[in-house]
Amino acid sequence: MRIAMLSYHTCPLATLGGKDTGGMNVYVKELTSHLGRAGVQVDVYTRSQDEHVPHVLHDLGYGNRVVHIPAGPEIPLPKPQLATYISDFTKGILQFAADRNFYYDIIHSHYWMSGLAGLSLREQWSSPVIHMFHTLGLMKNRIARSEAEVEGEYRINGEADVIASADRLVAATIAERAQLESLYRAPASKISVIPPGVDLSRFYPIPKDEAKAVIGVPPED
């Protein structure tokens, strides 16, 4: 099996802690690594943000790789500008795959812009689109503290298009599934809840006294 993993706006190999790097980067990287361990071939497609970085990197183990597709200027761009280059991203993926005679059994997209790219790829490949949002625009708008934090109609409409057309939606939690159903009227039959895993080499129990010392709680409390 071969999967085309789409992470349009951010690279899974990017340094964590930036404005647009965090949990999704870790999720895509670890998911790809574990799929490779299970014998699944994965190409992660992301928008190139640095012309000096090789466009193809084999850094995810088991032969799986990240493919940087030029789409717009090869520099970091604010998210509102990225939607302009989704079609260029899609064309670049199609060309890369065609040059190597690749066929993908599944398109797995992450975040709403990747979802739109995935729907376009499906038109050419006839491969099912499995999509995960990670964050939802309407949910973010509910808790926005200022006008600057409000997501625009283009994102909301884009999310609605992905929900309506994707073959399967993945929610990380039961709460996210409920949000998809109530805010976007997503059909319950289309949603699968798949909780993220835990890196047990990084997160593990330690003795209570040691834990209290780490967070500054007196031993007797």
Image: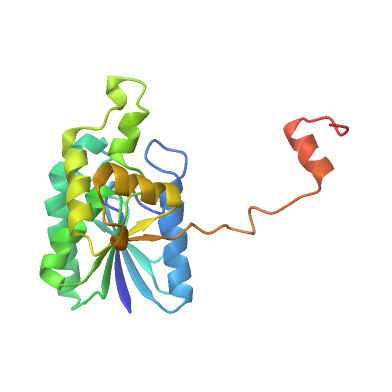
Q: Which quadrant would the N terminus be assigned to in this image?
A: bottom left
Report if residue 71 is visible in the image. no
What is the x, y in percent for residue 30? 47, 61
Q: How many marks?
A: 0
Rendered residue at 19%/37% (across/down): 81
Quadrant of the rendered structure where residue 67 is? Answer: bottom left
Rendered residue at 17%/42% (across/down): 157
121 left or right, relative to 184: left
Rendered residue at 18%/78% (across/down): 101
- Rendered image coloring scheme: rainbow
| Above or below: residue 193 compared with residue 63 | above
Quadrant of the rendered structure where residue 123 is? Answer: bottom left
What is the x, y in percent for residue 10? 33, 48
Rendered residue at 34%/37% (across/down): 139
Report if residue 124 is visible in the image. yes
What is the x, y in percent for residue 118? 20, 60
Quadrant of the rendered structure where residue 121 is? Answer: bottom left
| Above or below: residue 101 compared with residue 54 | below
Q: Which quadrant would the C terminus be assigned to in this image?
A: top right
27 left or right, relative to 95: right
What is the x, y in percent for residue 162? 21, 53
| Above or below: residue 52 compared with residue 140 | below
Residue at the far right: name it.
Answer: 220
Residue at the far top: name it.
Answer: 146
| Above or below: residue 143 compared with residue 138 | above
Q: Nearer the viewer, residue 151 or 64?
A: 151
